[in-house]
Image (cartoon, coloured by chain):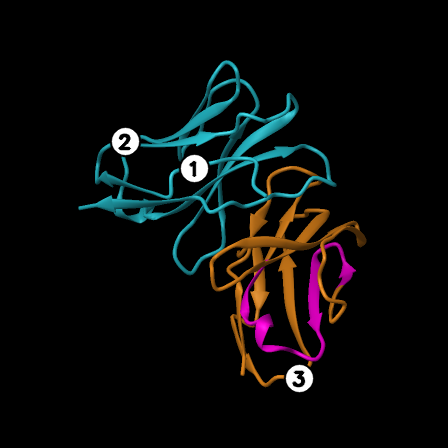
Chain colours: A cyan, B orange
Amino acid sequence: DAKTTQPTSMDCAEGRAANLPCNHSTISGNEYVYWYRQIHSQGPQYIIHGLKNNETNEMASLIITEDRKSSTLILPHATLRDTAVYYCIAKHMNRDDKIIFGKGTRLHILP
Amino acid sequence: DTAVSQTPKYLVTQMGNDKSIKCEQNLGHDTMYWYKQDSKKFLKIMFSYNNKELIINETVPNRFSPKSPDKAHLNLHINSLELGDSAVYFCASSHGEETQYFGPGTRLLVL
């Protein structure tokens, strides 16, 4: 079973910031928070990951609460191409720990 | 300059046949994976290989046999195909336990 919970779906207007929440209340101290997305008919695409600190890259920002029980993925200026299923994943950095994909959040960007 | 490639993209075959799906990565990664995404869109890991050594082997029928001729390739051979094997199969690769990068998927339909 996935160690994270996410809303089933969300809508966001094009050009606005999309904020996708994720709960991981049982995350252990050395588990990273990863975000992937899957655009229709494509393979999963890595977005960003972090451990404790907030992270930002060219795609998104990741805000992790101080207690690490939840996080938010922020797409600063959503476009129609950001319509996808977004997966939040908790994972150790060791080769025996596999990625467990939950149901994710289906994000609809509205024109 | 595709990073993770899979062939074929589509595969339609009869029950009972034996088929192979090929995966190649040009990222210089040492770890490769096979995932299965069923009709309900759940994405689950099947196998992972590190430097040609099997690391993760989920509860997968032994009709499925991964083969890694070298670090850049991980092929999936399926014997005696069944209707329930119809799914999208994704290959992925990573450098050790770091971020995984996925291929475009192979859509298998067993008739």
For this rendering, which residue is in front, B75 or B38? Answer: B38
Spatial CA distance of label 2 from label 1 is: 18 Å
Residue that appears at 64% across and 24% down? A28
Examine the rendered structure and indicate whether residue A83 appears above or below residue A4. Answer: below
Number of residues whose C-alpha sits closer than 10 Å to that of mark 2, classed few (under 14), some (14–19) or many (20 or more): some
Q: Which amino acid does label 2 sit on?
A: Ala
Examine the rendered structure and indicate whether residue A82 appears above or below residue B42. Answer: above
Question: Where does the magenta region start and end?
Answer: B67-90
Number of residues whose C-alpha sits closer than 10 Å to that of mark 1, classed few (under 14), some (14–19) or many (20 or more): some
Left or right side of A43 for A77:
left
Q: Residue A94: where, in percent of width, then height?
A: 72, 35
| Residue mark closest to the camera, 1 vs 3 | 1
**Residue designated by label 3:** B17
Mark 2 and 3 residues: CB-CB less than 8 Å, in contact? no
Label 1: element kind: loop
**Residue designated by label 2:** A17
Q: Residue A43: where, in percent of width, then height?
A: 49, 55
- Quarter holding residue A10: top left
Quick check: can you spot residue B3?
no
Subunit of mark 2?
A: A
Residue at the extreme right of the image, as rendered: B53
Quick check: can you spot residue A105?
yes
Residue B77 highlighted magenta (yes or no): yes
Label 2: element kind: loop
**Residue designated by label 1:** A6
Subunit of mark 3?
A: B
Image quarter (top left, top right, bottom left or bottom right) of the N terminus of chain A: top right
Q: Residue B93: where, in percent of width, then height?
A: 64, 50
